[in-house]
Image (tube, rainbow, N blue to C red):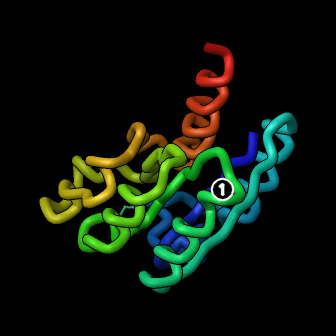
Amino acid sequence: MKLLILNGPNLNLLGTREPEKYGNRSFEDHFADLQFKFRNVELSYDQTNIEGELIDKIQNARKDFDGIILNAAAYTHTSVGIGDAVAAIDIPVVEVHISNTFSREDFRHKSFISPNAKGIIVGFGLQSYDLAIQSFLRDEDE
Ligand code: DQA
């Protein structure tokens, strides 16, 4: 099982960015934990602040991965193009968010990704990523 974790804008600053909302760990540290915890999964991690690069990475992932765990961050709420990219590929995409976007501002309640996501995991801190990986493993068992 090969999974790509793809993070969008400002998530490179995890650990120092608004720690009351996003915690005080960098994603690199959490990713190292994920690799250890899910040793049976081939995990890759990528991040970009640029909308078009996210679209390229989503398109390219369909050739190399069994699924994508996508936190498109602010573009979740604005990007028709990223929503269309998720719709265009035939590997499953699980949408994740660290914070509970539904308990925050109204503009965070809208997602252009959700209609074409396999599922959505929202509000469990960095553990949202762990739960997303587990959802793919559950599929393998079934
Ligand atoms: C986020 C939620 C988004 O609304 C926000 O723009 C982010 C992070 C999250 O993981 O909680 O950058 O995707």
Instruction: Say whether residue 118 is left or right of residue 60.
Output: left
User: Residue 25 at x, y = what percent?
Assistant: 65, 61
| Residue at image location 85% in from the left, 34% down from the top | 40
Ligand 1 falls in which quarter?
A: bottom left
Q: Residues within 10 Å of mark 1 (few under 14, many from 20)?
A: many
Question: What residue does disc 1 label?
Answer: 4
Instruction: Say whether residue 82 is left or right of residue 11.
Output: left
- Could you say which is closer to the camera, residue 64 or residue 135? 64
| Residue at image location 86% in from the left, 38% down from the top | 39
Type of amino acid under label 1: Leu
Label count reads 1
| Residue at image location 81% in from the left, 47% down from the top | 42
Instruction: Say whether residue 73 is left or right of residue 4.
Output: left
- Could you say which is closer to the camera, residue 47 or residue 53? 53
Quadrant in the picture for residue 107: bottom left
**On-image quarter of the C terminus:** top right
- View extreme (top): residue: 142
**On-image quarter of the N terminus:** top right
- View extreme (left): residue: 106
- Could you say whether the residue bearing mark 1 is in a helix, strand or loop? strand
Q: Is residue 13 visible?
A: no
User: Residue 36 at x, y = what percent?
Assistant: 86, 42
Q: Is residue 101 visible?
A: yes
Q: Is residue 87 above or below residue 56?
A: above
